[in-house]
């Protein structure tokens, strides 16, 4: 099968819905090397080439370099030239290593659908996934498990992180890494100029005015530590960011839990950089 920049392919997932990927860059040699992204399209019907959901990444983490070893049961929808913003992804993608196989990318929207619609079935799939591909795709801890740990943070206690740390330490090393991935993704999502302008006296003003990237990171930590409801509200309403307050301690949670469990030093680096200004799109 020959792939071209701008191609769109669909695949029928286990629940009968169709998901789609968009090809950005092709480098055909002995085997195809592709830069692709999972799209937001997920529907019972096959899409028309003009459906706008085919031209929107599933999320900011869905762009991957892949090697196409074997392809089956995928269907060509059509080809549309890349938009300028899509061409720009190539420059930023050079730091990415090879990710998942093509079918794992197609299944991403299905896994998210299953987690939302039938959590018990999703957990069963996780347990029965002998190949490890599902856990590989789900780099971060499932949302419910992540927020259950966050809910154990007690700001009034002498050690606010104690219960959350003990819970995290009781989990597997892989789950601890997945928690770190989930935390990094959420901190990254709040790394925007709009959020930085809403943190009180230390708010971002302009490039000429002093601004502490560290304090903004710690303020984002507090927004996460306050729980799922608060975090999701702040994502949509930057003006609701905590004012003149922070929770730097959240950044120590994973390392302390890992060391408590293994007595080894934590040296894992998540796939998303959550340091201030890392989210380039949020600072345009």
Image (cartoon, rainbow, N blue to C red):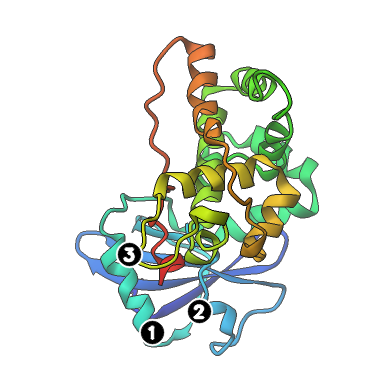
Residue identifier under label 3: 34
**Secondary structure state at the residue bearing disc 3:** strand
Residue identifier under label 2: 55
Which disc, if any, is residue 83?
1
Which residue is at 66% across, 65% downward?
236
Residue 200, image quadrant: bottom right
Q: Is residue 219 above or below residue 57?
A: above
**Callout 2: few (<14), some (14-19), or many (20+) C-alpha neighbours within 10 Å?**
many
**Secondary structure state at the residue bearing disc 1:** loop
Residue 104 visible in rendering: no
Name the foreground residue: 4 vs 75. Answer: 4
Which disc, if any, is residue 24?
none
Q: Is residue 4 above or below residue 68?
A: below
**Pointers 1 and 2 in contact (C-beta within 8 Å):** yes
Which residue is at 42% across, 40% downward?
270
Badge 3 or badge 1: first in the primary sequence: 3
- Quarter of the image for the N terminus: give it: bottom left
Task: For marks 3 and 2, give the one nearer the viewer.
Answer: 2
Q: Position of residue 91 (x, y in %)?
A: 26, 67
Q: Position of residue 178 (x, y in %)?
A: 54, 36
Residue 230 visible in rendering: yes
Q: Is residue 24 above or below residue 139?
A: below
């Amino acid at each position: 099968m020959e792939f071209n920049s701008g191609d769109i392919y669909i695949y029928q997932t286990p629940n009968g819905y169709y998901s789609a990927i968009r090809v950005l860059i092709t480098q055909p040699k002995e085997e195809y090397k592709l830069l692709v992204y999972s799209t937001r399209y997920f529907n019972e019907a096959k899409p028309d080439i003009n459906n706008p959901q085919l031209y929107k990444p599933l999320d900011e983490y869905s762009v991957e370099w892949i090697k196409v070893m074997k392809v089956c049961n995928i269907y060509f929808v059509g080809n549309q030239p890349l938009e300028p913003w899509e061409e720009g992804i190539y420059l930023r993608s050079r730091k990415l290593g090879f990710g998942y196989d093509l079918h794992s990318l197609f299944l991403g929207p299905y896994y998210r659908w299953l987690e939302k619609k039938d959590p018990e079935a999703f957990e069963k799939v996780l347990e029965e996934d002998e190949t490890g591909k599902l856990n590989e795709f789900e780099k971060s801890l499932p949302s419910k498990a992540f927020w259950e740990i966050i809910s154990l943070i007690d700001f009034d206690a002498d050690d606010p992180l104690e219960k959350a740390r003990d819970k995290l330490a009781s989990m597997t090393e892989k789950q601890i890494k997945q928690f770190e991935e989930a935390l990094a993704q959420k901190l990254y999502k709040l790394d925007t100029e709009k959020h930085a302008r809403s943190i009180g006296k230390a708010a971002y003003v302009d490039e000429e005015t002093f601004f502490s990237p560290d304090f903004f990171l710690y303020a984002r930590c507090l927004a996460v530590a306050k729980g799922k409801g608060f975090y999701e509200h702040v994502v949509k309403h930057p003006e609701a960011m905590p004012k003149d307050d922070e929770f730097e301690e959240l950044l120590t949670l994973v390392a302390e839990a890992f060391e408590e469990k293994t007595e080894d030093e934590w040296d894992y680096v998540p796939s998303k950089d959550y340091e201030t200004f890392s989210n380039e799109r949020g600072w345009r």
